[in-house]
Amino acid sequence: MMTERFKELIVSGSEFEMGRQIGEECKEQIKDLVQITLQRFNLSSKKIISLNQAIDLVNKIIDSSGEFLEIEFNELKGISESADVQFEELMILNCRNMLGSIPDGCTSVLVSSERSSEESSIAGQNWDNDPLMRDYSIVLTRIPKDKSKNITWTQPGLSAYMGINSEGTAICMNALNGPVDTKGIPWYFIVRKIFDTTGIKEIKDILKNITPAISANAAIVTNEGPVNFELTPSKIRYIEPTEGLIVHTNHCVHNDLVINNIDFKDKIYGQSFDRKIRSEDVLSNINNLSLENIKSVLSDHVGFPTSICRHENSDKLTGWQKSVISLIMLPESGQLHISAGNPCEKEYEVYFLN
């Protein structure tokens, strides 16, 4: 199989200083990315969003969330200055999942350290989305002042994406069917605040004091074990592991939220139920789960082409999407294993949080 590494970037300092460094190193990527964000959104949207509509939305978010997100906004201001892009354009990138209802998906797997055969717990996922985003993605390490450092696979200009921090926390992200509240806190900024925590208690403290703007899922491993958070604007619920294992896809699982699987059925991404059942069937029969076991299940083709390892297909809205990357994290070891493409076709490359 072929190998491919993403560009790696390490930044440090205050949020503004880190933003300036990201903007300087990724200037052309960021300029292109902010230009195509709306275009790529409209490819999968049933309702076309204009630039004026997007700017109007993000200006309202800036007004309502600016005080709470002051620290996170400082990084975007640094990027804006050094990459010569408008702050509002970066906000459209960070609020792209609030522009309307578009389908995207992922399959996530969490394994406790007790259930793992590695010297770490395990968190892994496939990111089923726009294949063009692979060309705009990097592996970014942030070393902020007086906070946990983190390493993420991301597009430069985003406040946060999937990755691990130096406290042993790994975060996977899944689209989730449910309501939207444009007065709430945008999803990527919530993830950024989670990266700045040291464990489950701090994560819960953050989540209980916010209203998420969208429905989304955070599949998390900390040094205290795996936990899964299903977030909606009206309710946030968490799910504990069963025998050290959690699998989550793109529909609601908690009893308080399963009504969303009826009320927002049209927002459930391709074969979500089948992917969850298949992953659990494969993994639940293995006592000590290894890195290779997780690679194998994330490469699974049962239900092809909309399988766990997703390939292009004939669906009118999402058939052009695929598993853009596969990501497996060993947080206690500070390792990200990433395939730059479908894991059945590309080898995993290893990146380290040093």
Image (spheres, helix red, strand yellow):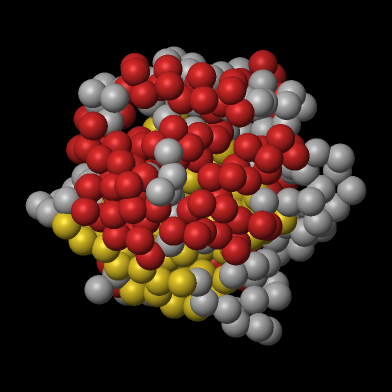
| Residue drawn at x 43%, y 38% as measured from the top left | 86
> How far across and how far down the image is residue 41, in percent?
66, 38
For the image, the number of numbered tags is 0
State the residue in front, 12 or 285: 12
Q: In this picture, is 70 found above or below 224?
A: above
Q: In this picture, is 299 found above or below 262?
A: below
Residue 140, quarter of picture: bottom left
| Residue drawn at x 86%, y 40% as measured from the top left | 316
> How far across and how far down the image is residue 321, in percent?
73, 51
Q: Is residue 349 left or right of residue 336?
A: right
Could you tell me if residue 349 is visible in this image? yes
| Residue drawn at x 25%, y 40% as measured from the top left | 74
Q: Is residue 11 left or right of residue 96?
A: left
Q: In this picture, is 67 found above or below 348?
A: above
Q: Give the quarter of the figure containing the C terminus.
A: bottom left
Could you tell me if residue 153 is visible in this image? no
Q: Give the quarter of the figure containing the N terminus.
A: bottom right
